Amino acid sequence: MKVLCYGVRDVERPLFESCNEKYHYDITCVPDYLNTKETAELAKGFDAVILRGNCFANKQNLDIYKELGVKYVLTRTAGYEHIDLDYAHKLGFKMAFVPGYSPNAIAELAVTHAMMLLRHGAYATYRSSQKNFRIDGFEFSKEIRNCTVGVIGLGRIGRVAASLYHGLGANVIGYDMFEIKGIDGYCKQVPLDEVLAKSDIISIHARYNTGDPKLVTADFISKMKDGAIIVNVARGQLVDTEAVIAAIESGKLNGFGVDTLIDEADIFGKDFEGKEIPNPTLAKLVSLYPRVLITPHLGSYTDEAAREMVDISYANLKEFIDTGDCKNKI
């Protein structure tokens, strides 16, 4: 079984190789993302491809895969909006995703964003890097034990995040569409409007399905405390970026930490140093540093999360080969 793995960074290669010791696939890892005709044609001679986020299995690329004889289109991500599922099903591809991996990886990044914004860490360390060691009024901070943190989305990742915030001493409240049991020791579940009204930090861990409305809108923000912070390490599609920009500029929000953006493919994975960012909305968002902190979708970029994503992808392929079906099929 010949498998082409897209978007593999050098530091990830040993994980692909070690995980393959129990599967014995003939794997080839490339750093390229699937985003052009040329990158789709890299799959010539392969039976399966393993994608990552921002690898676009659109009609053009799926047609190329079909012509080249690719049978399996797998993604090592929880989301699969980057695959044209209807068209892929029409062409007969077998597809699967990774429904979950280390929740700690994502939750830890959320807490990191929250603490950097609360304690103005990015601002202070940048000034130090410029040899300016004076302390100014912007660096005056609240302690998180005097804050209420609202966690929106109490799935696996949200629950870990809530427990981490609680461990730091915060008063943690949370909202989910369903009643979540077993969290009373570290999080009180309340209605969404109560989360918005009481929280100094809102940490978003909600799920997103294609076609869902945005969660963070101008109306959502208007219900929040003045000077609060939003952290989003879930889906970029959950947030109205322009509404957040307006709230940062007006002072309604004191900070925005984000690992995923709705148009992130326009900038993530690219170097614009000394150049203009072509997407004006994202260019404006970037310009609001240090009140806006952006990481380029690296929530799962940890040893544990990457290993699980690769291993589950390999297991998905084996299940297809052995049974013709897969519990994680899409």
Image (cartoon, rainbow, N blue to C red):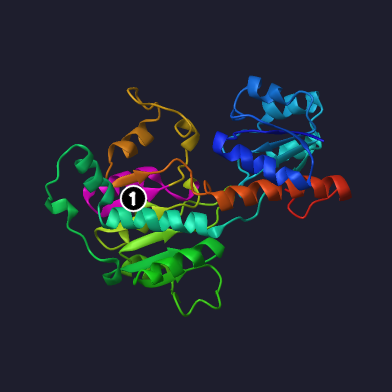
* Quarter of the view holding residue 282: top left
Could you say where residue 170 lies in the image, as x and y percent from the top left?
A: 34, 71
Residue at horizontal 36%, vertical 65%? Answer: 196
Q: Residue at (48%, 32%) from the top-left corner? A: 269
Q: Which residues are magenta?
A: 237-258
Q: Is residue 219 visible?
A: no
Decide whether residue 288 is among the magenta residues.
no
In the image, what residue type sits under mark 1?
A: Phe
Tell me if residue 125 comes above or below residue 179 in the rendering.
Answer: above
Task: Please identify the quarter of the rendering in which residue 91 is found.
Answer: top right
Residue 179 in the image: state x and y as whole percent.
55, 75
Magenta run includes residue 254: yes
In percent of width and height, residue 119 lies at: 26, 56
Which residue is label 1 attached to?
256
Task: State the residue at coordinates (68%, 27%).
Answer: 61
SS for callout 1:
strand
Which quadrant of the figure has residue 286?
top left
| Nearest the eye: 256 or 50 | 50
Q: Is residue 327 left or right of residue 323?
A: left
**Quarter of the image with the N terminus in it:** top right
The location of residue 309, given as percent across then percent down, is 64, 48
Q: Nearer the viewer, residue 95 or 226?
A: 95
Q: Dot 1: within a 10 Å radius of its alpha carbon, few (fewer than 14), some, or many (20 or more) residues?
A: many
